[in-house]
Image (cartoon, rainbow, N blue to C red):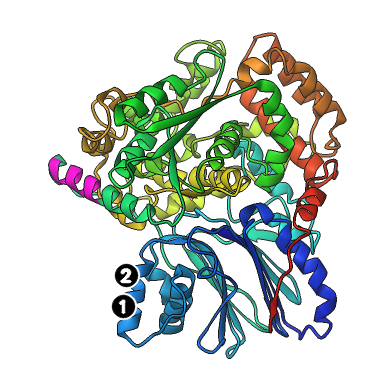
Amino acid sequence: MCGFISVLSNSPMNGIDQNIERFKDMTNIIWHRGPDDAGYYFDDHVLFGFRRLSIIDIESGKQPIGYEDDRYWMIFNGEIYNFIEIREELEALGYTFQTESDSEVIVALYSHKRERAVDDLRGMFSFVIWDKKKEELFGARDHFGIKPFFYLEDHDHFYCASEKKSILLATDGGKLDRESVQHYLTYQFVPEPHTLSEKIKRLEPGHYFMKKIGQKLQIKPYWKPKFTPRLQELSASIEDIRHGLRESVSLHMRSDVPVGAFLSGGIDSTSIVALAKEHHDALKTFTVGFEREGFSEIDVAKNTASELKVENIHYVIQPEEFLKELPKIIWHMDEPVADPAAVPLYFLAREARKHVTVVLSGEGADELFGGYTIYNEPHSLRHFRYLPSALRKALPKIASLLPHAMKGKGFLERGAMDIEERYIGNAKIFLEEEKEKLLNDYNEEWPFQNVTQPLYQKVQHYDDVHKMQYIDMHTWLRGDILVKADKMTMAHSLELRVPFLDKEVFKVASRLHPSQTIAEKTTKYALRKAMEGIVPNSVLHNRKLGFPVPIRHWLRNEWVSWAMELIEESETDLLFDKSVVLGLLQEHQAGQRDNSRKIWTVLTFMIWHQVFVEDKYSFRTDALEREKATSPVFNR
């Protein structure tokens, strides 16, 4: 596990030594991703920088790594869980290896199969390979987007990095992307491949690129998630799920350092813990919560840990430390992600890192196995499909006459819409008419449909539940869930592994019929049945909480003054009509309406603006000062 930065120059870098100090800063600013080691490679066209967190012995995993008489050089972030099996196949073909690392296996596989190497990889990864002979750079990102990958292409240079902040040390990243700001206010994150910086993009999951000297970047997909449901006996599906998850957890447990697991009160993390305990009897688990009633899963997690006979280490987060750490959390995030759950995850990772270097977690189960309550909606709204067309078209007008808080108003509104209109993903913060009031330069040519319509067009033949899962896999999962999972754990040099997000597990999940995922008034039905006898009965049907955070209460009480001060001081007047934001806060404080998620989305952006635009904090300087002792050896 690590972080990297690479620069490709179309022109020979004759004055390369002059660039080294700045390039070291670009590498060391992500010290937190790899505090154990630094490595560099450069030639006339390429600079590679690498920070390493040791999971397997330090010497075996050194990077950048060369192969085939140094024709190839690679930097790699992630873990390949089937690298032992791939190495054995390559050795049978005559390939030789100098290390025991998965890194060398990737570059050897690339030597053998070129771009088709990615088809064989099972794991989480982003990597870049430089072919000196062909003067070509190749890079790829894993199937689901577990590991991040930023890039920028200008007229003479091409940058790739694990974190956006590395690129920003060398370039301005371009202007603020106003369309991305508009989409952020809808989703609470910027949908990929875009970022808030006009020139900086993200390589999408399941894609690779090729960049030859003097030629334009080429990006191609190598894998796309497809749901291919088939009707089979539930017992067969249950057996497939159990086998797939057991194998995935087994592979994810490979490590030379202590492995622990996050544990909440839900079935996802509990399933992973129960299966991991089959391989590691002394497994440590970690949980956080808040003192306010209804906003902590600590008691449930403690009981679950007791039933599974594993240790549980827990921590109670105070509202004061929550606010104190918030700017640093957003600095680590690179882009604003206004999911309040990112903050408890930061503290959870901090506590876990005191005991282990690797943790397993349950991310991805909801998207693959149908775990969100809203996936029940197509069934709830099914009767609206039988209404006469004229009556269905009249429903929005009827609903508009009802009081805002009246029960059933939203049900009528949603019943009148097709799935493409009403579902844009797991988060929907500001409506278009609300963004028009909030933004000083709202552009009606940038509605949220610009993000979702191309996705819906690809899956017109899917049933509505699978359409919702597909939308979430391409927006919520990669834009929110996996961003905060990676950034909050890496902030503490902790490696997170997610066994549900395995391509073989997805094969199993993709074959489930919706009647096996959304059934008997519950979600993840087949997964719950598969986990019977493996997880405690008390967990099998627990209501999903998902890191509840009491921002609704805090923004009505102890945080009001802080929020008002932030809004007034923020240098975002050109973007936002602050009177609208203050109005939302006053309305929320008075208890007239719950505006907490809308307010939090704006406040998160304002802090991001203070960190990355106004330069109000010293996190960048602090990060560079931290790595004064590094003495890199340059390979040429």
Residue drawn at 43 percent across, 47 percent down? 259
**Label 2 packing within 10 angstroms: few (<14), some (14-19), many (20+):** few
Label 1: which secondary element: helix
Q: Are marks 2 and 1 in contact (CB under 8 Å)?
A: yes
Please give the count of numbered marks on the rendered protein.
2
Residue drawn at 79 percent across, 43 percent down? 611
Read off the residue under disc 2.
85
Looking at the rendering, the stretch of residues picked out in magenta corresponds to 235-243
Whole-percent x and y of residue 457? Answer: 44, 53
The majority secondary structure of the magenta stretch comes to helix
Whole-percent x and y of residue 273? Answer: 35, 39
**Label 1 packing within 10 angstroms: few (<14), some (14-19), many (20+):** few
Whole-percent x and y of residue 243? Answer: 22, 50
Q: Is residue 222 above or below residue 317?
A: below
Would you say residue 522 is visible in this rendering? Answer: no
Locate the C terminus by quadrant: bottom right
Label 2: which secondary element: helix
Q: Left or right: 459 with respect to 431?
A: left
Residue drawn at 63 percent across, 46 percent down? 491
Residue 272 falls in image quadrant: top left
Kindly identify the amino acid type of the residue bearing the numbered disc 1: Glu
Kindly identify the amino acid type of the residue bearing the numbered disc 2: Glu
Residue 111, disc: none
Residue 390 falls in image quadrant: top left
Whole-percent x and y of residue 473? Answer: 45, 47
Mark 2 → mark 1, Cα distance in angstroms: 6 Å
